[in-house]
Amino acid sequence: MTGNAQFQVSGSSDIPQEETDDDHILQLVDMLGQLPPEMLAKRSRHTRYFDDTLKLIRSDVGSSEVIEGEPFQGPSLEEAFEESRPDGMEAEERTQVLGLLRRLLTYQPALRLSTTEHLKDEWSHSIQ
């Protein structure tokens, strides 16, 4: 929509897949908010990054067991969108687009918009 990637996972054959996956999860949490506890619990390495209350305790991805500095908090979906928002987009349209994106990118598949629901969305319908 803005022409910019919202999630960037830099892959390299030198970086173990589990660390790449960790980086991706951390970016998702920054952008979309905390994963539901039942989803996070499926990740064996979640305790490396989140405490018992699911608060982020580290964002440095790597093999070190030593936490380095304060956790980095990347931009939320709203902040990233605002940085890349097309010129001339009015506040009402911004609200509609962000609402649509939130409903499309929700973690729980049962709550995610279907294709039909997406096409019936007020903003989607207005650009057809």
Image (tube, rainbow, N blue to C red):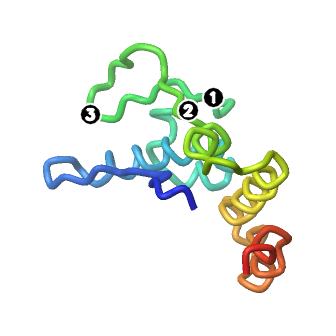
Q: Which dot marks residue 50?
A: 2
Rendered image quadrant of residue 56: top right
In the image, is residue 69 above or below residue 94?
above
- Residue at the (80%, 73%) spot, across then down: 126
Please indicate whether residue 66 sits to the left or right of residue 72 in the image: left
The mark nearer the N terminus, 1 or 2, is 2
In the displayed orientation, state which residue is furthest to the front. 88
Q: Position of residue 65 (x, y in %)?
A: 32, 25
Measured in 3D between alpha carbons, the distance from the residue under mark 1 to the one under mark 2, in whole angstroms, is: 5 Å
- Residue at the (69%, 30%) spot, across then down: 53
Q: Position of residue 94 (x, y in %)?
A: 75, 51
Measured in 3D between alpha carbons, the distance from the residue under mark 2 to the one under mark 3, in whole angstroms, is: 16 Å
Q: Which dot marks residue 55?
A: 1
At label 2, the amino acid type is Phe
In the image, is residue 48 above or below residue 93?
above
- Residue at the (85%, 51%) spot, across then down: 92
Q: Position of residue 106 (x, y in %)?
A: 70, 59
Please tell me whether mark 1 sits on a helix, a strand or a loop. Answer: loop
Which residue does the numbered mark 3 point to in the structure image? 63
The mark nearer the N terminus, 3 or 1, is 1
The quadrant in which the N terminus is found is: bottom right
In the displayed orientation, state which residue is furthest to the bottom. 116
Please indicate whether residue 77 sits to the left or right of residue 6 in the image: right
Question: Callout 2: 10 Å neighbours few (<14), some, many (20+)?
Answer: some
In the displayed orientation, state which residue is furthest to the left. 14
Please indicate whether residue 78 sits to the left or right of residue 7 in the image: right
The quadrant in which the C terminus is found is: bottom right
Nearer to the camera, 48 or 8: 8
At label 1, the amino acid type is Lys
Please indicate whether residue 6 sits to the left or right of residue 98 in the image: left
The mark nearer the N terminus, 2 or 3, is 2
